Image (tube, helix red, strand yellow):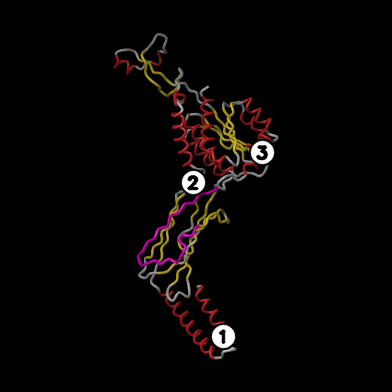
Amino acid sequence: MRRISFYWLGGLIVCFGLSYGWPELYNYGIFGLFMLLVALGYNVYRISTANYKIELVIKTPPIFTLGDPNTITITLKNTGLEGVNLEPIIFEAYNRERVIFQHELFHHHLFLKSGETIDFSFLFQPKTRGLLMINPLEVTIFVPPYLLRKSLKLGTSQTIKVYPSILQMKHFKMLFTANLKQIGRSMALKKVHDGFSYELEQILPYNTGDDTRKINWRVSGRKAELMVNKYQSDRRRDVYIILDSTRPMLQEGVGSMSIFEYAINMTLMLANIILQKGDRCGLIVVGKQTEIRVALGGGQKQLKRILESLYQLVPTDNEGDFFKIERLVGRKDILLVCSHEEQLTGIYLPVFKRLFKLFSTIPVWLSERSPQNFKALGLQAGRDYLSKRTR
């Protein structure tokens, strides 16, 4: 029943109550009760025979990306021959059993004409990774005389994964490249070394002392002089990203996202830059257990492995074992440590000092203020990485 029906019943109760003092009101109450029953019966008939057919389609991206505005579109269409009134519809998204997002499609009653289609679009910004569940929407309709309503479950259940932000990763790559060119360091990416690899840099005239194995006979025939291939040297570096998933990282930063979720996006962004430069990248997670989650590797497949591993990571409320990092890494080229600045003031300070001494280490210290200068932190870490890899 709708609210108007309860108002009518309340009026009848008041009328019957007052009839003890004014008996003539009793007849009015009986007449009103009769009219209410007739109206309810007619409403039952109308709502069961009304020629309407509501279709609802929920359109979402294949995956949601962490911390980014993701567009959700809901389409309502009345394919019946009769218009129908709808009460406000609430869209809900769940992470397991917990409601993490609610959005009211419209605020007042909506009349959907026959054959009319209405689209609703809104943005959803996930604050955590994992599986997002969208249940069928409950649509409430009512027809004249508007005393009763009928609820329908429309749409299909959907389960969507919330991954670390691939959009931020691509945006950071473009911003990083543009930033390097702006500060005049783009030549550091193209530094030529006289070595031998499969990547051809340029073709130069032959000089005395050049390796005869590098002579390009095809080009030499066209030029009528000896030409040699100049290759880039193989300066591939091994880089381990150390990701802290311990208690301090659970603190909430600006935007209702935990520091750990910001660190997840930062790790993916930096891993992409490392792999784009041809280096090998691996992932070590410091949590309840300190372990190598992704072994060293290169190429786009390695980026997918890191992405999947970051998607599955769950932070812990325990303290981490940073002492195990040195034993896991061995003697690799570069370490990139992504941790909370609180760790510098705790018992792990000697560990970090030793890592800085033994390895070429790049620290990325996060805090509750980090979301405000997130891009600046990433750019600085990227510049430090390039500086160390070209030494």
| Residue 244 position (above or below residue 219) | below
Which badge, 3 or 2, comes first in the chain's sequence?
2
Taking the view exactly as shown, the residue that stands out farthest to the bottom is: 23
Provide the secondary structure element on which disc 1 rests: helix
At which x and y percent is residue 320?
66, 38
Task: Identify the residue shown where x is 41% and y is 15%.
Answer: 213
Q: Alpha-carbon distance for marks 3 and 2?
A: 29 Å
Extent of the magenta region = 103-128
Provide the secondary structure element on which disc 2 rests: loop
Residue at label 2?
A: 68
At which x and y percent is residue 35?
47, 84
Amino acid at dot 3: Gly
Residue 215: which quarter of the image?
A: top left
Residue at label 1?
A: 16
Q: Is residue 339 left or right of residue 383?
A: right
At which x and y percent is residue 159?
50, 53
Provide the secondary structure element on which disc 3 rests: loop
Amino acid at dot 1: Phe
- In front: label 1 or label 3: 1
Taking the view exactly as shown, the residue that stands out farthest to the front is: 21
Camera-side residue: 104 or 225? Answer: 104
